[in-house]
Image (cartoon, rainbow, N blue to C red):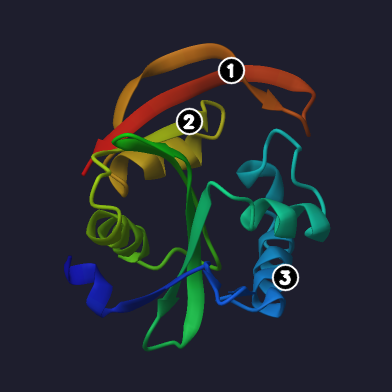
Amino acid sequence: MHNLSRFEIYPLVRVNGDWSIPDEVLLGIWNQIVAEGKLEDLFYDGTIKTPFEWMAFIKRPGTYPILIADKNKKTVVHIAWLKDVWDIGAWVHHCSLGKYQRGAWEASRDYWQKYFKHLKILLGMTPKVNETAVRFLQKICKFTIVGEIPQMCNMAYKGERVATILSYFEL
């Protein structure tokens, strides 16, 4: 869990009825995702297209978002979230903010390992056509690719269905 020392992790949770991260910060992250041209890759199915949809999504019960901040730069460099947590597994999603900061993914993984002790498997579903994400999945995240499922990903912005790469990481 060495990566937790370089990065600060901020979970989005309710504390006494209030969210732990202000809406302004979450909207700033949304704006950065859009400005960096990452929206269509991150939400390729077209279900999240507006700031309102983003806020509803990120605060939805069953979604466990965390912000990863670089302590030295004093800025959020990554956002990640778990969805559909059950038994020993959960689907994981993430996005760098700006250029990827080495160790940010590992810090999120280490955080989940520490605070979600029942989790043993992180699952991924990545559009095969997003070759950059597939390479990142293998080289940085160290996920094991199980295989591909044809037509599983609805690429709403391109009007086509493509194969998904199904993968997992064993904590």
Q: Where is residue 134 in the image (x, y as percent from the top left)?
A: 43, 35
Q: Furthest residue to the left?
A: 2
The answer to which of 158 and 29 lies nearer the viewer is 29
Instruction: Place residue 85 in its image quadrant.
Output: top left
Q: Can residue 29 be seen in this view?
A: yes
State if disc 1 and disc 2 touch (CB < 8 Å). Answer: yes
Q: Is residue 68 left or right of residue 19?
A: left
Earlier-in-chain disc, 2 versus 3? 3
Q: How many residues crowd mark 1 within 10 Å: few (<14), some (14–19), many (20+)?
A: some
Q: Residue at x 40, y 79 (%)?
A: 70
Q: Position of residue 115 (x, y in %)?
A: 29, 60
* Label 3 element class: helix
Q: Is residue 122 visible?
A: no
Q: Which mark is residue 27?
A: 3
Q: Which mark is residue 125?
A: 2
| Residue 158 in the image: above or below residue 67 | above
Q: Residue 152 carries which label?
A: 1
Inspect the image, locate mark 1, and give the three-letter code of the amino acid beneath it.
Answer: Met
Q: Which residue is drawn at 34% across and 36% down?
A: 89
Using the numbered discs, state the Cα–Cα distance from disc 2 to disc 3 in whole angstroms. Answer: 25 Å
Q: Furthest residue to the front?
A: 16
Q: Where is residue 4 in the image (x, y as percent from the top left)?
A: 26, 72
Q: Quadrant of the C terminus?
A: top left
State if disc 3 and disc 1 touch (CB < 8 Å). Answer: no
